[in-house]
Image: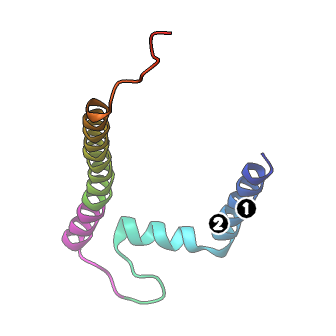
Amino acid sequence: MRIFVFFIILSVVALVAIIDSGISDALLAFLLSGAVPGTTLTVSPTVMMIGCIAAAWLVLFRLTALSAINVVTMRRLVNHHSKRQARMPKRRYSRI
């Protein structure tokens, strides 16, 4: 419980620090208009769209790939366990 409260307080402090420093405004300006903070450079909308699609695809792929890997691993472990149980001898005194 103490660790949970500590992480909540830490995340609130970090969020307040990010908002006060202006990082959130610069990030929002970069994502919406492509303006690189601190420079006069801008990124074209096509490049921004491709970058956002690539980032979303990577996040989605990671989430689905991890869940698929977990399903395959669990199936393999269940099959291994059931085969091992079938090979085990019956217990001698199971009917007592």
Tell which residue pokes out farthest to the right in this image: 2
Residue drawn at (31%, 57%) of the image:
62
Residue drawn at (73%, 61%) of the image:
10
Depth order, front residue of 66/23: 66
Q: Which residues are magenta?
A: 41-55
Q: Which residue does the numbered mark 1 point to in the structure image?
A: 10
- Residue at mark 2 to residue at mark 1: CA–CA distance: 14 Å
> Which x, y percent locates residue 71?
29, 42
Please check the rendered image and state whether residue 24 is part of the magenta-colored stretch, yes or no: no
> Which x, y percent locates residue 77?
31, 43
32 horizontally vs 2: left or right: left
54 horizontally vs 21: left or right: left
67 horizontally vs 16: left or right: left
Which disc number belongs to residue 63? none
Determine whether the residue tagged by mark 1 lies in a helix, strand or loop: helix
Q: Which residue does the numbered mark 2 point to in the structure image?
A: 19
Depth order, front residue of 28/16: 16
**Which of labels 2 and 1 is toward the front?**
1
